[in-house]
Image: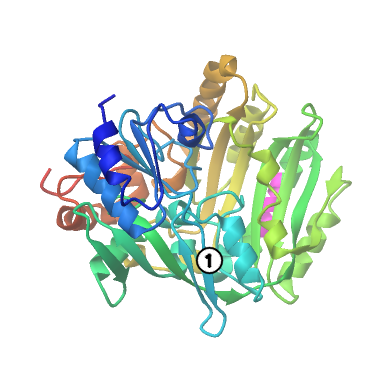
Amino acid sequence: MPDLAPAVGDLSKSFSGRLLLPQHADWDAARRVHNGLVDKRPALIAQCRGSADIVSAVQLAREHGLEIAVRGGGHNVGGRATVEGGVMIDLSLMKYVHVNPAARTARAAGGTLWGQFNRETQAHGLATTGGVVSTTGVAGLTLGGGLGWLMPKHGMALDNLISAEMVLADGRIVRAAADENADLFWAARGGGGNFGVASSLEFRLHEVGPMVTGGLVAWPAERAGDVLRLYRELALEAGDDLMLVAGLITGPDQVTKLVGIVAGFFGRGGDGEKAINRIKSFGQPVLDVLGPIPYAQLNAMLDDSYPRGARNYWKAHFCEGLDDAALDTLIENFNTCPSPMGQILIERFHGAATRVPVTDTAYALRAEGFNLVVLAQWMAPADDDPGRAWARSAYAALTPFVASTRYLNYLDTDEGDAAGLAAAYGPNVQRLQSIKARYDPENVFHLNVNIPPSSL
């Protein structure tokens, strides 16, 4: 690693946050991200407290020819929040949420987590589309798309973004919004951090909760075929008030394989209520925790299933339809999963999130359908090879059923190539490359599913 001590010493005189070199007592803990499979050693971790700190960190990295990674919540499965031998710009000290209940807006700092965001907005009975795990970062999830419980009713997280303050590669601090740097605003909504560091984000809020209807119902895996066909039927009938996810999972005893439907209903009755009743009355479930629940608690319900430090390798692809052969393939492959922490998830995309034209934002997954996620997760390093092998095998088995589009935030470390870029952005690639050439012509921010500037 380069000797950054003299430069860090000079910068520390004005830096508001913390500058952690490898010899610092907190460096080892600070370098670790949510995915325990990622084990990188930055030359410097710059824990920023504001935009000026971010500017200084970008400038230091560029002056020393070092790669830059940006950490918000640190949840990205590919480990793109950290870097080997470069500078990690760590926003974890930048956590605040300012809610304007009269205007129904909220501004969050770049290191804010969704659980913190929901706590503040729900104090006013307001919310916006956010992640389904409360420890996920607001910025990273939003810039890459932002699926969540409210996406059928209110669109993706990025569809609710009003503006973002961004630190660019040349150190400028700019506002990106519909009325200011509109091209940057278009690109940032789905561009996944390719265009700068989001120091804060302003969102549109909606009346939600505090009490909603949501939760999980699960059955023995032997009923998987019947349950997944029920899920498909309900998903195809669902209106904007209802979000549905199905999962092939292992029970709390770490042995019993289950099939479950997770639902969130945000209406006042009608078809959504009927769907909830059909789920609860289907056969004899072994677990039923679907009912009235605080919205903030619904968003934290799955946290324990994704513990920090677990080793994760994911493969995901979008399907416009889900026929019986596809369902059978999912079930067969789940039965060979080597870890009780592994899962196969089916996420329904419909409603408001799919009514936005593909070219209105950089984010291109706007079709109705199902996102299939092969989620390999385990704890012991000795299980790395079996975990990856199972995910790759199960994913390959789904090839006959998938469409061309993929969800950016689920692309793992080995999927940031041209094929991944095309799958994530579709017809928007060329425009994105042109905007990248304007705002980051030297491709400083490239530790992502990279959009190379059009001149490269």
Quarter of the rendering occupied by the C terminus: top left
Q: Position of residue 422 (x, y in %)?
A: 30, 45
Which residue lies at the image location 82% right of the left edge and 62% below the top edge?
Answer: 277
User: Mark 1 = which residue?
Assistant: 97
Is residue 50 visible in this depiction of the protein? yes
* Residue at the limit of the structure toward the right, as seen here: 284
Which residue lies at the image location 57% right of the left edge and 62% below the top edge?
Answer: 117
Q: Position of residue 187 (x, y in %)?
A: 29, 60
| Residue nearest the viewer, comparing 374 with 378 | 378
Is residue 196 visible in this depiction of the protein? no
Q: Position of residue 436 (x, y in %)?
A: 20, 53
Which three-letter amino acid code belongs to the residue tagged 1? Val
In the figure, 49 relative to 64: above or below? below
Left or right: 56, with 414 as reference point: left
In the figure, 433 relative to 398: above or below? below
Question: The magenta stretch spans which residues?
Answer: 228-234
| Residue nearest the viewer, comparing 117 with 156 | 117
| Residue 232 drawn in magenta | yes
Left or right: 280, with 319 as reference point: right
Left or right: 52, with 110 as reference point: left
In the figure, 274 relative to 76: above or below? below
Which residue lies at the image location 72% right of the left edge and 40% below the top edge?
Answer: 225
Q: Residues within 10 Å of mark 1 (few under 14, many from 20)?
A: many
Left or right: 14, with 132 as reference point: left
| Residue nearest the viewer, comparing 21 with 215 | 21
In the figure, 385 relative to 103: above or below? above
